[in-house]
Image: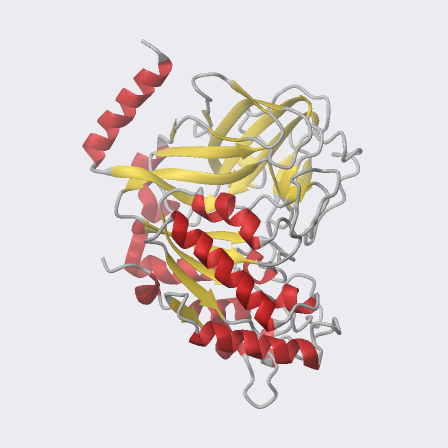
Amino acid sequence: MPYRVLLSIALTLWCGLAGASEWKTAWTASAQGPYPSGYPIAHPGLRVAFPDPQAGAVTQAFRMMVRPDIWSARARVRFTNVFGTEPVTFAQVYMGLQQGGGAVVPMTNQQMLFDGEESLTLEPGESRWSDPVFLPFFAKLGPRFLYGRKLAVSFHVAGQSGPMTWHAQANGTNFLSAQNVDAVSADESERGYPFSTASWYFIDAVDMLAASSTDVIVCLGDSLTDGLMSTLNGDDRWPDALSRLARAKYGNTLSIVNAGISGNQILNPPNYTYSAKHPVGAGPFAEQRVERDVLSLSGVTAVIWLEGINDLHHGHSAERVAAGMENVVRQMREAQPALRIFAGTIISTKGAVVSQYGSDTVNRERLALNEFIRTSDIFDGVVDFDAALVDAETGMMRDIYVPDSVYGSAGDRIHPNRAGYGRMATAVRLDAVLPKR
């Protein structure tokens, strides 16, 4: 019997035992361009691991750590070569429970297949889901004890990859082998991964097979959602903090995932060509990336969108940015009419150390854009992030939210620190964002 038929039968039987189930996105990291374009934070030097960015990975192993927001016994991973210029072959793909550092908990590493095959070749521009993989430890531990833990997705790039599709700012540590080594993905120890990286490569989503009633919220935006200046390995971006706040009420029935890209804009660049020849560090503009980063994800119920300050910084008016937001909202509603779309107000950058962000002109346009967001009828609701962080007397971000959590610097008055991201999370009323249960 063909492998796909057997797989379908197995999944049908499992779903029947577990109740109505569907794929739901549990983790995402928006692909933004080819390495090294982008804005990684606290990033180690990679001249030994990747001596030639145009050659990319060369017969090399990756161990990427991802933190699912929901858990089940079945998972799958989406691999992507969307910004590549050469075919990439992935072999020896495994998923297991992170023990610590680059090590995997013994006896949890499970091999992943692609239509029953042990390897996958992606042409430039392609993305592909793996076959479902069974996570045997789920039955023993359950979501209560797995929440907050990380999965290790290990894979071997066979041959030369060419420019590598990545998400620059992981705000966490992942692991790499040297070049020209044998596959070490099946090895649960960390000895085959001597190099570290603070970015994710070649994967952009993880799904879990979950109850059909599970809601998925996508947090779409720029560096304020990507978590610039949050704590390295602290998992304290505002979507992370929101997830922890939600856990007591919603448990394993709500997944909150992060589709932020540092530097991203609503209006620019208008013609990103998805190639490594002319990379843009901040990734495609919102209208161009929303299909892959929101609409193609599994089981999305709602979007919380915080974006626009980078457009104002680059000289666009509030009126133009508002028109761009209307276009993106229209695109999402045409694709998924039931999708609930919430907009976040743009937080104050008054007094920012980067002068253009802190200018009176940008602040004036920011206030006008926030007025549009608060009063427009195109959204299902508003999350007032600015009101949560602003000092009413100065119009600036409150001092307590300014000092940087990563480098220990004075902060930039554009990005909040750990305390500020936590305060942003409390501004979200999930009972309003989610459909009635």
Residue 367 appears at what percent x and percent y? Answer: 57, 79
Q: Residue furthest top?
A: 1
Q: Residue at x 54, y 67 (%)?
A: 322
* Quadrant placement of the N terminus: top left
The answer to whether residue 67 shows anywhere in this view is no
As drawn, 112 above or below 265: above
Residue 135 appears at what percent x and percent y? Answer: 38, 31
Residue 387 appears at what percent x and percent y? Answer: 49, 79
Q: Nearer the viewer, residue 413 or 282?
A: 282
Q: Nearer the viewer, residue 221 or 155?
A: 221
As drawn, 390 above or below 99: below
Relative side of 437 to 142, left or right: left
Q: How is the image coloured?
A: secondary structure
Q: Nearer the viewer, residue 43 or 319?
A: 319
The answer to whether residue 56 shows anywhere in this view is yes
* Quadrant placement of the C terminus: bottom left
Q: Residue furthest bottom?
A: 393
Q: Residue at x 73, y 26 (%)?
A: 179
Q: Residue at x 49, y 34 (%)?
A: 78
Q: Nearer the viewer, residue 420 or 293?
A: 293
Residue 280 appears at what percent x and percent y? Answer: 70, 48
Relative side of 306 to 333, left or right: right
Give the image quarter of residue 173.
Answer: top right
Count of marks placed on residues: 0
